[in-house]
Image (cartoon, rainbow, N blue to C red):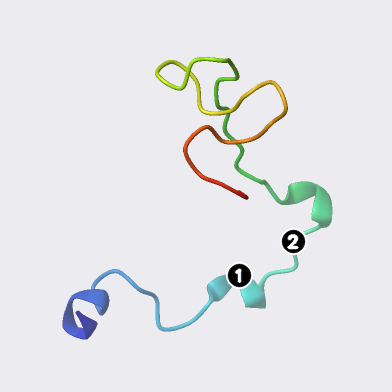
Amino acid sequence: LADMAKHHVLDKNFYMDMNIPVAGVAHQAGTCRFGNDPATSVLDAHCKAHEVDNL
C-alpha cells in the first residue's frame, strides 16, 4: 500500500507556501434527499439518517 501511495500522495503540502485569502478558499458541499421512505431518501424529516443510528 505504501508503494502505491508514492504515485498519488504529494511529498509536501504546496498550499502551505501560498498566501490564499479566506475568500479564495472553496468548500465542497453535496446534497442528500429527505423523505419518509429509506428506499428513496437518506434522511428523514428530522434530519436523521434512515440506516445509520446517531449519525
Q: Amino acid at mark 1?
A: Tyr
Question: Which numbered marker is on residue 20?
Answer: 2
Q: Secondary structure at mark 2?
A: loop
Q: What x and y, as percent, mark residue 8?
A: 29, 69
Q: Count how many numbered circles sit on residues in the image.
A: 2
Q: Residues within 10 Å of mark 1 (few under 14, many from 20)?
A: few
Q: Secondary structure at mark 1?
A: helix
Q: Closest to the observer: 37 or 15? A: 37
Tell me where residue 30 sits by quadrant: top right
Q: Closest to the observer: 27 or 11? A: 27
Residue at far front of view: 53
Q: CA distance from mark 1 to mark 2?
A: 8 Å
Residue at figure coordinates x 47%, y 37% from the top left: 51
Query: Left or right of 30: which side holds 22?
Result: right
Q: Residues within 10 Å of mark 2 (few under 14, many from 20)?
A: few
- Tags 1 and 2 touching, CB below 8 Å: yes
Q: What x and y, as percent, mark residue 19?
A: 75, 68
Query: Left or right of 31: which side holds 24?
Result: right
Q: Closest to the observer: 18 or 48? A: 48
Q: What x and y, as percent, mark residue 42?
A: 51, 28
Q: Which residue is mark 1?
A: 15
Which numbered disc flags the more N-terminal residue, 1 or 2?
1
Residue at figure coordinates x 55%, y 27% from the top left: 32
27 versus 36 height, above or below: below
Q: Amino acid at mark 2?
A: Ile
15 versus 45 height, above or below: below
Residue at figure coordinates x 68%, y 70% from the top left: 18
